[in-house]
Amino acid sequence: MALKSSPDRYGTVAIWMHWLSAALILVLLATGFRAAYALDIESKAALLRIHVPVAVAVLVLTLARIGWWLGYDHKPEPIDGTTGAQRLARAVHVLLYVVLLGMSASGIGMMILSGALPAIFAADPVWLPRFWHYPPRLPHAFGARLLVALLAFHIAAAAYHHIVRRDRLLRRIWFAD
């Protein structure tokens, strides 16, 4: 398999970035929602100790993906008969990138404004700020829900292609041919 994409298949770099991003985003959503509703400081801090470094990794990976597409690679051609749907798919992908970057910015803003990082990474956290008191918390919460909706749409579209259309779309973004 080639590093770069071909007209009918994604390359190894794009495939790895896609699936690694997917896995890390699921970790972010799970830890973020659980932390938001955690009642005790220790549980919330433990979840945020996972959430914060994974969020940094997703930010770096998202910037790398954008750089990869803009500077080094081109996405495969649309599958026959999907031009209208392909425009919608591209819009969803762009929105995913925008939401991920916005979530990163609002998360960084919350950490800076609240001063929470030392408390989160303390051996025995005794306090955590009330994140809702900081302006970036609202767009962060909205972004998380929008991200869930976009991912659900993305997964549903992939399932439609795989189950209904049987057009081998998923094989283009998988490791084996």
Image: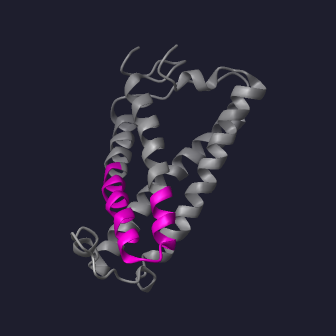
Relative to 157, say whether 49 is above or below: below
Instruction: Name the residue furthest right.
Output: 164
Relative to 74, say whether 116 is above or below: below
**Between 90 and 44, the one nearer to me in the picture:** 44
Tell me which segment is drawn in magenta.
30-57
Relative to 98, say whether 38 is above or below: below
Relative to 147, say whether 81 is above or below: above
**Between 174 and 99, the one nearer to me in the picture:** 174
Instruction: Name the residue furthest bottom.
Output: 133
Answer with left or right where residue 35 lies relative to residue 123.
right
Where does the image place residue 95, in percent across and percent down from the top left?
54, 52
- Which residue is at 63% across, 55% downward? 149
Q: Residue 18's quadrant in the figure?
A: top left
The reply to whether the magenta stretch includes residue 62 is no
- Which residue is at 34% across, 30% downward? 72
- Which residue is at 34% across, 69% downward? 45
Magenta region, main secondary structure: helix
Q: How many marks?
A: 0
The way the protein has been coloured in the rendering is one colour
The reply to whether the magenta stretch includes residue 31 is yes
Quadrant for the N terminus in the image: top left
**Between 67 and 148, the one nearer to me in the picture:** 148
**Between 172 and 80, the one nearer to me in the picture:** 172
Q: Residue 84's quadrant in the figure?
A: top right
Where does the image place residue 102, in percent across and percent down from the top left?
44, 62
Where does the image place residue 141, in percent across and percent down from the top left?
52, 70
Where does the image place residue 82, in percent across and percent down from the top left?
70, 29
- Which residue is at 25% across, 75% downward? 119
